[in-house]
């Protein structure tokens, strides 16, 4: 009778932990997706990387050797950043990127709802966003990760160092170089005179 009760209790614990993980996942999903999107600069890749990050987190949580987590959000961020960096490294061999054919692209543009900012604002915002994404692409992987964590995720230097497994001084150097490169690349957007 004791063995049967232990099995039932273990089954109930697993169901409760699955439910808790699902709730936690929903609360973190948007943040992790946006982080992945900024690092990968591709919505579909970011969606897939987000799923991979949560899958890795779930698998790690179910390992018996896992220690107690101090900050689950920071731990998950580190998993997501590493997942994105792995994807970026494996993507380097690709010399072309997928893009819809011109007819599909035109159909998508025609179906896009109008509203919000006027056409000039949209063009300027699109130009700035495109230039920023292009400038971010030119950064090294570590510089892009450090910049994204600092300026999009609002992480402290210590948190970035822990997530990227670097010294704080190294993080500062990556941020300084990333900022300098971005300023140089985007200078004409702000000083057109």
Image (spheres, rainbow, N blue to C red):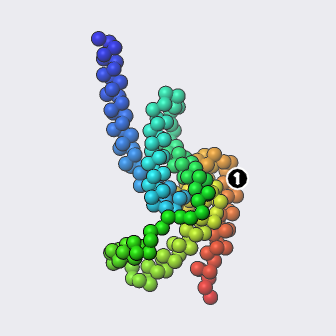
Image quarter hosting the N terminus: top left
The residue at the point 48 percent across, 41 percent down is 56
Q: Is residue 81 something that shows in the picture?
A: no
Q: Position of residue 118 (x, y in %)?
A: 39, 82
The residue at the point 30 percent across, 22 percent down is 8
Mark 1 closeness class: few <14, some 14–19, many ≥20 residues within 10 Å = few
The residue at the point 35 percent across, 28 percent down is 13
Residue located farthest toward the bottom when viewing the structure as drawn = 193
**Count of numbered circles in the view:** 1
Image quarter hosting the C terminus: bottom right
Q: Where, by quadrant of the figure, is residue 91 drawn?
A: bottom right
Horizontally, is 169 left or right of 151 in the view?
right
Q: Position of residue 93 (x, y in %)?
A: 61, 57
Task: Identify the residue under disc 1.
Answer: 169
Q: Position of residue 96 (x, y in %)?
A: 56, 64
Q: Is residue 151 something that shows in the picture?
A: yes
Horizontally, is 73 left or right of 170 in the view?
left
The residue at the point 59 percent across, 52 percent down is 90
Q: Which sits in the foreground, 129 or 149?
A: 129
Horizontally, is 157 left or right of 34 in the view?
right
Q: Which sits in the foreground, 64 or 75?
A: 64
Horizontally, is 24 left or right of 153 in the view?
left
- Compared to residue 159, the image places residue 124 above or below, namely below
Local secondary structure at mark 1: helix
Q: Position of residue 44 (x, y in %)?
A: 45, 58
């Amino acid at each position: 009778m004791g063995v049967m009760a232990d099995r039932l209790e273990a089954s109930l614990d697993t169901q409760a932990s699955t439910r808790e993980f699902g709730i936690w996942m929903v609360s973190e999903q948007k943040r992790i997706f946006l982080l992945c999107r900024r690092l990968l600069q591709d919505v579909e890749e970011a969606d897939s990387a987000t799923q991979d990050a949560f899958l890795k987190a779930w698998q790690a949580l179910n390992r018996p050797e896992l220690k107690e987590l101090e900050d689950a959000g920071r731990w998950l961020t580190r998993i997501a950043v590493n997942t994105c960096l792995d994807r970026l490294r494996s993507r380097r061999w690709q010399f072309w990127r997928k893009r819809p054919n011109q007819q599909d692209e035109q159909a998508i543009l025609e179906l896009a709802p109008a509203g919000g900012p006027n056409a000039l604002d949209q063009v300027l915002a699109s130009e700035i966003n495109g230039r920023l994404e292009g400038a971010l692409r030119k950064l090294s992987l570590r510089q892009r990760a450090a910049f994204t964590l600092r300026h999009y995720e609002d992480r402290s230097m210590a948190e970035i160092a822990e997530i990227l497994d670097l010294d704080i001084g190294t993080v500062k150097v990556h941020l300084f170089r990333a900022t300098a490169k971005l300023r140089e690349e985007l200078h004409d957007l702000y000083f057109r005179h």
